[in-house]
Image: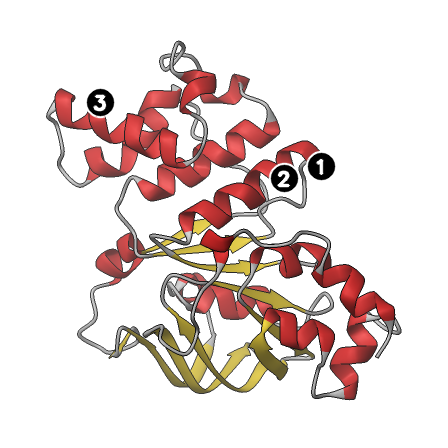
Amino acid sequence: MTRMFTDIVTARVPSPKSAVNLALAKPKFTLQNVNFWYPGKQVLFDISLVMPERSVVAFIGPSGCGKSTLLRMLNRMSDHVEGVRHTGTINLDGQSIYNKDSNLVDLRRRVGMVFQKSNPFPKSIFENVAFGPRMAGQTNRRVLDELVERCLRQAALWDEVKDRLNASALALSGGQQQRLCIARSLATDPQVLLMDEPASALDPKSTAKIEDLIDDLKATYTIVIVTHNMQQAARVSDITAFFFEGVLVEAGPTRQLFTKPSKKQTEDYITGRFG
């Protein structure tokens, strides 16, 4: 096996708090034989995967391999695209998210989303975080004050903005805006955070802060991240799933997948022979 696997995995040695006992962790998401079509084209083929709770699962693979499509299926964002269809099952805590009786609003409260490009609302820092709870009917100012502080602390942003909560969120730096979007997602008390390339537009310093934040958040939340950065996947994830042309080629504990993959195709991708 080439040295590159070891170099990638040891780029950052996980701290003890990062260790997740995958054998003991309960399943959060369970996918069985999932297929997905956009109009006229199938983009996911027979995907089966278990994602343990309070862990970080990374989706890797070349552009167009279906990573983001699958991510968006986990909180049914794909429902907004006309003409799509799917087969198979996706269970969250043992219950199908596509059951006809499932509550879509509740699902999206439980499964938050952070996008590649930070998208703060054109409101104050405070109102960005308080937006979700206000929409849910929370009007008590003391409760909102406590919630905003808690979420900004969880997002490692409180100390940087506590003296300007009424300032526009659009005045923050790119890295701060992304952490604000994470805080906004946390304000609805989710169980899962979906992150689609959350650091791809950020500088190395801001990227490191996002990665440290992910490491802290997984003590409470299940995190699923799409990334093109294999070093990032190695640094932050407990499980890595490698996709190619809509097929799940291989999935397993991150260190194992990067150091001793079972599929030649996985090895070729990680070592840069294609992709």
Q: Answer whether residue 203 is visible to the viewer in this image.
A: no
Are discs 3 and 1 less than 8 Å apart at CB? no
Up-down relation of residue 50 to residue 230 (above or below): below
- Residue depicted at 58% across the width and 41% down the height: 117
Mark 3 belongs to which amino acid? Answer: Asp
Are discs 3 and 2 less than 8 Å apart at CB? no
**Residue at the outermost top position:** 163
Name the residue beneath numbered marker 2. Answer: 208
Q: Position of residue 69 (x, y in %)?
A: 54, 68
Query: Depth check: 259 or 156 in front?
Result: 259
Question: Gap in Å between the C-alphas at discs 2 and 1?
Answer: 6 Å
Q: Quadrant of the N terminus?
A: bottom right
Q: Position of residue 104 (x, y in %)?
A: 26, 62
Name the residue beneath numbered marker 1. Answer: 204
Dot 3 falls on a residue whose secondary structure is: helix
Q: Position of residue 248 (x, y in %)?
A: 60, 82
Q: Position of residue 73 (x, y in %)?
A: 44, 69
